[in-house]
Image (spheres, grey):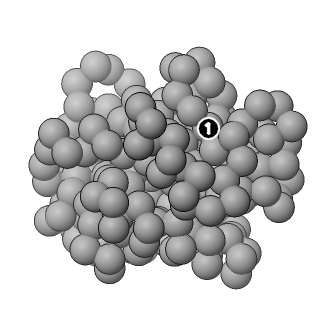
Amino acid sequence: MNNDLFILGKLKNSDKRAVAVVGSREMTARGKKLTEDFVKEFVKEKITIVSGLARGIDTIAHKTALDSGGRTIAVLGSGIDVIYPPENKKLAEEIAKNGAVVSGFPYGMKPIAKNFLARNQLIVKLSQVVLVVEGKRRSGTISTANHAANEDTEVFAIPGSEVTDYLIENGASIANSPQDVLEYLNAR
């Protein structure tokens, strides 16, 4: 990944007030509902939702932000012209109309595994807070949380899954409700 940022849509100053919402590609019904509930509350407070356009929690975070009239930023692990997963092409087009699709990779770059670690780093850089909804202990979600810790970005985790319980045991803040995250943001 180079330092150039490729953008479809537009980044706005208001996007500095942003929460990354990340979690499992293989989400549970609970994870889907939690994502929707948290994102709706964030959008009411004019907070931009940042995520990675992946299947599962990321997709629900982006869709809920759009459906609630909010802004969202999708960060790709591929070139801006290679939407992955392909079933999210229409979603990416919608995001570009009311938010931004961004990539740190050149045109034509395929979505190879190592790119997603760099993508997770960019998700953190674009966010004030990272919220981990759910996931397995060994997942990309943990790399996003690690990047956040290295960048001194606050990590919140919703209790009740392998990865979130692990993160909480290791110092992540507990998010029992959207209010927990909003109070932190409003105190900054």
Q: Quadrant of residue 17?
A: top left
- Quarter occupied by the C terminus: top left
The residue drawn where x is 62% and y is 24% is 149
* Left or right of 32 in this view: 70: left
Residue 134 position within the rendered picture, expressed as x and y whole percent measured from the top left: 71, 59
* Residue 124: percent from left, percent from top: 47, 34
Element type at mark 1:
strand
Exactly how many numbered labels are in the figure? 1
87 relative position to 4: left or right: right
Taking the image as drawn, is residue 166 in sight?
yes
| Residue nearest the observer in this picture, 26 or 159 | 159
Q: Is residue 116 left or right of residue 141?
A: left
Height in image: 69 above or below 50? below
Where in the figure is residue 166, as x and y percent of width and height? 85, 42
Q: Amino acid at mark 1?
A: Val
Q: Which residue lies at the image location 32% right of the left edge and 79% below the top edge?
A: 67
How many neighbours does mark 1 have within 10 angstroms: few (below 14), some (14-19), or many (20 or more)? many
Quarter location, residue 147: top right
Residue at the spot of label 1: 155
Q: Is residue 20 left or right of residue 25?
A: left
Q: Residue at x 44, y 67 (%)?
A: 41
Question: Residue at 38% across / 25% down in the picture?
Answer: 1
**Residue 161 x/y as whole percent:** 82, 59
Q: Is residue 72 visible?
A: no
Q: Compared with residue 106, is residue 97 higher up or lower down, i.e. above or below? A: below
